[in-house]
Amino acid sequence: MRRLLGRFRVSLSVMILYIALPGAAQLPGSPAAPSTTVPPSKRVWSQVVEPEVPYRRLDFRDKFIFQLHENFRTASLIPLFVSAGTSQGWDNAPHYGSDEAGFGERLGAAALRQASMRFLSDGLMPALLREDPRYFRKAYGGYAARGLYAASRAFVSQRDSGRSGINYANITGHLLAMGLTMTYYPHQDTNGGTVFRGTALSLLGSAGNNLFLEFIPDVLHKFHERKAGAVIGEPKTPR
């Protein structure tokens, strides 16, 4: 585990240096980025693209920066503790034991799995396959249609060309990240069954995350509307 974490730190450092080097984002022999590319200072590294916002393509380097934002935002801690907690409570894979030390190892394994999954499915694979790792929100239409659309985006992506296609980056990224768990999971969990079950569950989680991203703005909007209505409807206290 310590050896793997050491290798992961080295890989992460190399990747950060890579994206920081001028011109490193351009693959040898690949065409230059169009002049309409938005300056980095004006880019918003949100995982959601709203339908009313003009499309701004992420270039090769952008996608590595995007996955760093995904890995280090505060909300990314929530799934780590949920994963480690449920695994600890049910005493399922990875089998590190049910004591405090076991929970710490589960938490570390969850962090390593999540970091590698986001690096692969939000950074490396989208950059190589020219797919956009962000979620393009539908925002309009019936709840059922929007729900089906959101869930399908785990398997369908928007390409850099603007066309839709199979989300190879997300699928292969999750599969490769689960394959890496065979190098640091306990021996009884290093098998193909664990890898494919974990991949299926993580893709379902990706679909669930899209559903959250699709509908949470509606929930927040309703909440603010009610709050504003309550404030407006409050009788003024006489002085």
Image (cartoon, rainbow, N blue to C red):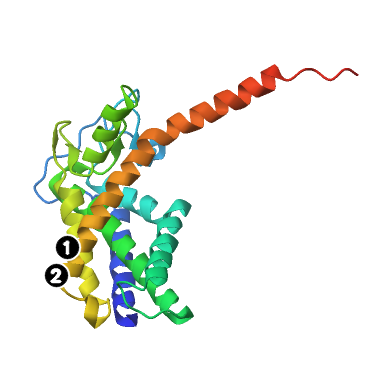
The amino acid at mark 2 is Gly
Q: Which residue is mark 1?
A: 196
- What residue do we see at 35% from left, 79% from top? 96
Give residue 122's position: percent from left, percent from top: 26, 50
Contact between labelled residues 1 and 2, with CB atoms less than 8 Å apart: yes
Whole-number angstrom distance, CA of label 2 to CA of label 1? 6 Å
**Label 1: few (<14), some (14–19) or many (≥20) C-alpha neighbours in 10 Å:** some
- Name, please, the residue furthest toward the right: 239
User: Taking the image as drawn, is residue 216 in sight?
Assistant: yes
User: Taking the image as drawn, is residue 26 in sight?
Assistant: no
**Displayed quadrant of residue 236:** top right
> Regarding mark 1 in the picture, which secondary structure is present there?
helix
Judging depth in this view, the residue of 45 and 151 nearest the camera is 151
- What residue do we see at 21% from left, 74% from top? 182
**Displayed quadrant of residue 172:** bottom left
Q: Quadrant of the C terminus?
A: top right
